[in-house]
Amino acid sequence: MSLTGSVFLDGMAVVTVAAFVVLVLLWPSLAGRGPRKMAARAGMLLGVNALVLLTAATQLNAQFLFFADWTDLRGAFGGAATSTALNRGIKASQATTRKVGGAAASAASTLPALPPGSVSASGVISFTVKGPVSGIAGTVVVQLPPGYTEPGNALVRYPVLEAFQGYPGDPKSWIDGMNLGGIAAHQAAMKRMRPALVVSPQVEIPAGVDTECVNGSAGSPQLETWLAQDVPNWVTHTFRVQTNRASWAAIGLSAGGWCAAMVAMLHPAQYAAAIGMGGYFRPEFGPFYYPYPPGGRLADRYDLVALSRRNPPPVAIWLQTSHADPVSYNSSAAFLRAAKPPLAVNAMILQNAGHRVSLWQGLLPGSLTWLGANVPGFKAAP
């Protein structure tokens, strides 16, 4: 019996309704103040409420596929999901060291002081940034690496991890929910990567809209420009960071995994690598947002499967997907089939896994270790 199949879901609904009917029929006979009757009433109420909550949870799981099947559910409570590793194209270390032409953010001769009192104990600062190229104003949350403000590190320049949240989400999803800055700091302390600046920009502009991080037709928000040009240029003019492509990587989960792959593949002069968890390789818009007509120039631009087949850039992609994840698997499988040099793809394909944050939290340390091992700007100093 499938965890998300109609037999199980309908069965749960029938059991819940039946329990409610039984409660209504038996309630008069349970009237009274005796301890047994009071306990019976309480037990039946708790049972019906538990069934209602369980039915709602199974329906939500079927819609959003947090757990793909019973094996995935068992794995979430202590088991390990079976996985397959696939590599396509060239080695990641070769792709990230290639020279690439094109525009990228440049360093400023002088940097502004950080806003007084803005740095929390965790190094998290929130800014409102106006992009001069895109015309977009949005929130950018930054987490400084440990020691950034110490005088002894005044000349140190750091690599940058630009993080993209899923939908719905907010710029603090990677910092609060995924603890990206904390895990990156731990990996750096273990000499698995270099300390990095985490930058998490707002992608839902207008608020609440599943923009898929793309530029729309004339008159629509230019999200790709905001994320891949305005934000990096603001970062290099605000913080002590490296500007070479081998010191910039994108990371994202679900819709943010698409965004990370998109900005890296379309802007290889800016980013050498991308990490995508449960992401995909063609935009998946919601029913109420159509930034450009199908079949046009922009539709072609944002088909990363076709790009990897036609003119793949020299970037390294680490991706995770699952056979049981309908959000991610189909386009990820097509992307893997199409990938060829000079693109480098390292894939972790799980056999039974859903589409959930708890899964990606467990994969984050390993993905950052991959980043430190294959992207020169993130490699730990000896």
Image: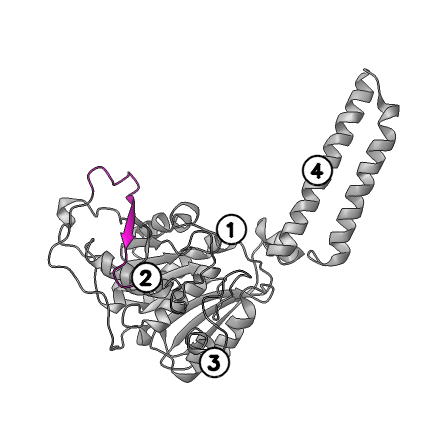
Q: Are marks 4 and 2 in contact (CB under 8 Å)?
A: no
- Find the magenta span and give its range: 115-133
Q: Is residue 305 above or below residue 242?
A: below
Crowding near the residue tagged with mark 2, few <14, some 14–19, many ≥20 C-alpha atoms within 10 Å: many
Give the numbered dot on residue 226.
Answer: 2
Q: CA distance from mark 2 to mark 3?
A: 28 Å
**Residue depth check, mark 2 versus mark 3: number of the one nearer the observer:** 2
Q: Earlier in the sequence, mark 4 or mark 1?
A: 4
Give the residue at mark 1: 358
> Which amino acid type is marked by label 4?
Ala
Circle 3 is placed at which residue position? Answer: 338
CB-based contact (under 8 Å), mark 2 and mark 3: no
Q: Is residue 187 visible?
A: no
Q: Residues within 10 Å of mark 4 (few under 14, many from 20)?
A: few
Whether residue 331 is visible, yes or no, is: yes
Please tell me which residue lies in front, 47 or 27: 27
The residues tagged by marks 4 and 2 sit, at their Cα atoms, a distance apart of: 46 Å
Local SS, label 1: helix
Whole-angstrom CA distance, mark 4 to mark 3, is 48 Å
In front: label 4 or label 1: 4
Indicate which label's residue lies in the foreground, 4 or 2.
2
Residue 50: give its label: 4
Q: CA distance from mark 4 to mark 1?
A: 23 Å
For marks 1 and 3 on the same chain, the one whose residue lies earlier in the sequence: 3
Disc 3 residue crowd, few under 14, some 14–19, many 20+, Cα 10 Å: some
Q: Earlier in the sequence, mark 4 or mark 3?
A: 4
Q: Residue at x 67, y 41 (%)?
A: 53
Three-letter code, disc 2: Trp
Q: Amino acid at mark 1?
A: Ser
